[in-house]
Image: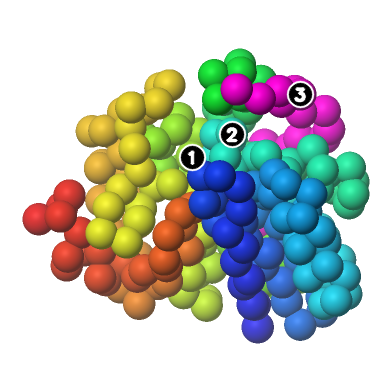
Amino acid sequence: MLQIQSFVFNPFSENTYVVFNDKKQAFIIDPGNFAEKETEVLKKFIEEKELKIQNILLTHAHIDHVLGLQKMYDLYQVPVLMHEIEKEILDRNPMDANRFGFFFKPFEGEISYLQESEKISLGSDEFNILHVPGHSPGSITFHSEEQKFLVSGDVLFEGSIGRTDLYKGDAEQLLKSISDKLFVLDPETQVFNGHGNPTTIGFEKSYNPFFR
């Protein structure tokens, strides 16, 4: 049985997730820990649960979702998994940081690339990879079909969708991604998103104002 723990980090109130199984194998998803105290909170949880980090996963590489990426990579020395298209966005982060008034070093570490319809495993549990561009060109979601949950990044929110005014955002593409890739999932599927409260596919299909 998978468990998921969320943490709200950094000035952007980004949701960082740790997904783990009964054998204490774990993924860190979208490490947004920026302040040292945030990193300590994340480390303490991992240590207290005695988790063994298998990979760091990125739904996408906007700066608010990777502020702790280098720190977590340096700590656990495990490959970062993301969509290949998103590497351009990751590489832009030092420039984006300058616009927000702080310094951010380019990421240095091992990256492996994921593709649409690929599966990744955490022990015996599988996640489907869905490519859902529009908010960012290489946005992907991690879908546990068996346990009916989805870590979606900034694609679909409670009553909203991801912004599309950032570099290579595309509103029409995002709406199509959600309709074609997410709204076909089981309505009971929980959506753990990049900001705010979790929701469900069924609720968003019925009530999200962008689809009414």
Disc 1 versus disc 2: distance between alpha carbons?
A: 13 Å
User: Residue shown at 39%/36% (left/top)?
Assistant: 135
Disc 1 versus disc 3: distance between alpha carbons?
A: 22 Å
What label sits on residue 63 in the rendered view?
A: 2
- Quadrant hosting residue 3: bottom right
Q: Are marks 1 and 2 in contact (CB under 8 Å)?
A: no
What segment carries the magenta color? 101-120
Does residue 199 appear to the left or right of 86 in the view shown? left
Main SS of residues in magenta: loop
User: Residue shown at 82%/77% (left/top)?
Assistant: 49
Label 3 amino acid?
Answer: Lys
- The residue positioned farthest toward the left in the image shown: 212
Label 2 amino acid?
Answer: Ile
* Position of 87 relative to 7 (above/below): above
- The first of marks 1 and 2 along the sequence is 2
- The first of marks 2 and 3 along the sequence is 2
Dot 1 falls on a residue whose secondary structure is: loop
- The first of marks 1 and 3 along the sequence is 3
**For mark 1, what is the residue?**
139
**For mark 3, what is the residue?**
105
